[in-house]
Amino acid sequence: MKLRAVSYGAICLISLTFASYSLYQGLRPAKSRAGYEPGDRFQMPDRSSWQRQALVIWASPDCGACQESARFFRDLTALPRATDVVLLGRESVDVLTRFAAEHKLTPDRIVSTAGSNLRFRFFPTMVLMSRSGSVSQAWVGRDPKREASLIDLVRVGGK
């Protein structure tokens, strides 16, 4: 009987701990959920040849939210822009290129992170990187309320 009470108590404690952690993760600011915060740096292949800041779109063809966001990504990549747009994913460049073609995306670059240790945590994530590779801003998920400001940022540039 005593063992049963201790077991139930342990199960309740573990459940409360898990629920608290899950709630904490859900309430954290979007910047930290992106895996990168302003001021962080990450290395991308061929970054040295980039001439402008870049909006990096971390996406996957297998991600439902990425599929839903594809029209917005198409609008971003169709603009005359002062900011480069980079489609980044863990799939091969061929798979990412097919995803871009299927949705009529025209990014400046398509980059595969296969085998790298980048810290992106959720799809889709967008990160504004300076020319030096420093993160200026980060956004997680799909949010129609911020789409106009992102379009302006890509068209005009800025931080």
Image (cartoon, grey):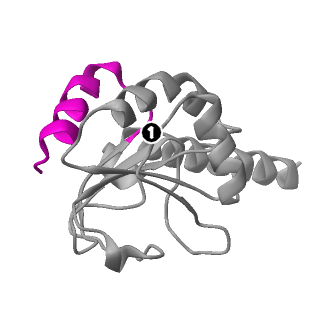
Span of residues in magenta: 140-159
- Residue for point 65% across, 39% down: 99
- Judging depth in this view, the residue of 138 and 99 nearest the camera is 99
**Few, some or many C-alpha atoms within 10 Å of disc 1 (few <14, some 14-19, many ≥20)?**
few
For residue 102, side relative to residue 4 (left or right): left
Q: Which structural element holds mark 1?
A: helix
- From this viewpoint, is residue 142 visible? no
Looking at the image, how many numbered discs can be counted on the residues? 1
58 is higher (above) or lower (below) than 103? below
27 is higher (above) or lower (below) than 43? above
Q: Position of residue 106 (x, y in %)?
A: 46, 40
Q: Position of residue 76 (x, y in %)?
A: 34, 33
Please name the residue that numbered disc 1 is placed on: 26
- Judging depth in this view, the residue of 11 and 69 nearest the camera is 69
Magenta region, main secondary structure? helix
> In which quarter of the view is residue 143 placed?
top left
Kind of residue at badge 1: Gly
Q: Position of residue 56 (x, y in %)?
A: 39, 53
- Residue for point 37% across, 26% down: 75
- Judging depth in this view, the residue of 20 and 72 nearest the camera is 72
Is residue 26 a member of the stretch shown in magenta?
no
